[in-house]
């Protein structure tokens, strides 16, 4: 990544590499970065949009690393040959059982634990936001989750969430926003630590700075700052 093009960077030096790690039935390709020097740090799993593991997601990983986290973004299309080999990614992702995506996200959690991550968070965007919700339901090892405009998980699973949830929405994203009230009511009823914010003027996928048709700079910058603040609060030792 050319660092000057990445608006998500903090002030810290980073080390980033393309890697592979073990999932239940495969070795998943991924991008991994951490603060330079390899010191112990909290870890964050980054789940991609329905376009696959594209440079934007690597920018997110680098952004977290420059802010003091180790972070990993798995390519959930590894078994299909990888994002770069697929002409039309969204329909391929849609054909894969949701349970496999959740299991792969949890494999990324285990990878970060093996690297010495002190606590684990997860963040995802669009399709990845939905995976983030489901992973938070499935794993007590996730201490904090930040789904960006992700569709709700099955609400009956919400009481299983152990981590603190900060849900991000764009004000113009009518389809996803239709589920906000039900989701917040379920979190409240289950006594899950949570907050959410709807960012004015922002459409779906507003955080993606490489998508000129969607990127909403004021909302994206504020949502990124808010996500960092949430993780700092809930992943601290």
Image (cartoon, rainbow, N blue to C red):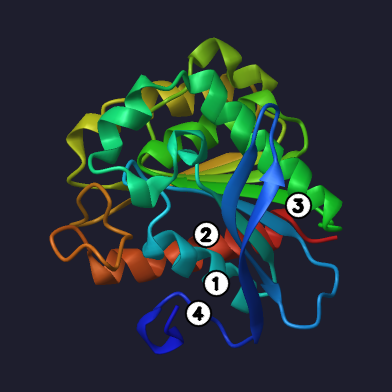
Q: Quadrant of the N terminus?
A: bottom left
Neighbours of disc 1 within 10 Å: few (<14), some (14-19), many (20+): many
Mark 1 and mark 2 lie on one chain; the one further toward the N terminus is 1
Q: Residue at x 82, y 57 (%)?
A: 115
Secondary structure under the numbered disc 1 in the rendered image: helix
Mark 2 and mark 4 lie on one chain; the one further toward the N terminus is 4
Secondary structure under the numbered disc 3 in the rendered image: helix
Mark 1 and mark 4 lie on one chain; the one further toward the N terminus is 4
Task: Tell me if I can see residue 81 in this picture.
Answer: yes
- Pointer 3 residue: 112
- Pointer 4 residue: 9
Q: Is 135 on the left-hand or right-hand side of 222? A: right
- Callout 2 touching callout 3 (CB < 8 Å): no
Q: Nearer the viewer, mark 3 or mark 4?
A: 3
Would you place residue 13 above or below residue 103 in this image? below
User: Tag count in the figure?
Assistant: 4
Closer to us: 7 or 168:
7
- Callout 1 touching callout 4 (CB < 8 Å): yes
Q: Which mark is residue 62?
A: 1
- Callout 3 touching callout 4 (CB < 8 Å): no
Q: Is 31 on the left-hand or right-hand side of 38? A: left
CA gap between label 1 and label 4 equals 7 Å
Secondary structure under the numbered disc 4 in the rendered image: loop
Q: Which mark is residue 235?
A: none
- Callout 1 touching callout 3 (CB < 8 Å): no
Q: Which mark is residue 227?
A: 2
Mark 3 and mark 4 lie on one chain; the one further toward the N terminus is 4
Would you place residue 101 above or below residue 37 in this image? above
CA gap between label 1 and label 2 equals 15 Å
CA gap between label 1 and label 3 equals 15 Å
- Callout 1 touching callout 2 (CB < 8 Å): no
């Amino acid at each position: 990544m050319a660092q000057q093009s990445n608006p998500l960077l903090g002030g810290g030096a980073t080390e980033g590499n393309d890697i592979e790690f073990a999932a239940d039935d495969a070795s998943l390709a991924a991008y991994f970065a951490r603060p330079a020097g390899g010191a112990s740090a909290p870890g964050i799993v980054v789940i991609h949009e329905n376009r696959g593991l594209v440079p934007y997601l690597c920018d997110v990983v680098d952004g977290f690393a420059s802010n003091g986290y180790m972070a990993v973004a798995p390519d959930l299309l590894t078994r299909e040959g990888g994002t770069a080999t697929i002409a039309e990614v969204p329909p391929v992702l849609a054909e894969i059982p949701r349970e496999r995506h959740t299991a792969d996200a949890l494999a990324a959690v285990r990878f970060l634990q093996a690297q010495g991550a002190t606590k684990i968070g997860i963040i995802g965007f669009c399709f990845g936001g939905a995976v983030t919700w489901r992973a938070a339901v499935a794993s007590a090892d996730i201490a904090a989750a930040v789904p960006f405009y992700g569709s709700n998980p099955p609400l009956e699973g919400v009481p299983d969430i152990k981590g603190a949830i900060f849900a991000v929405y764009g004000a113009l994203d009518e389809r996803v926003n239709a589920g906000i009230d039900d989701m917040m009511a379920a979190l409240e009823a289950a006594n899950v630590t949570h907050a959410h914010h709807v960012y004015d003027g922002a459409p779906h996928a507003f955080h993606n700075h490489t998508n000129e048709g969607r990127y909403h700079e004021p909302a994206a910058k504020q949502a990124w700052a808010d996500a960092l603040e949430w993780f700092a609060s809930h992943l601290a030792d």
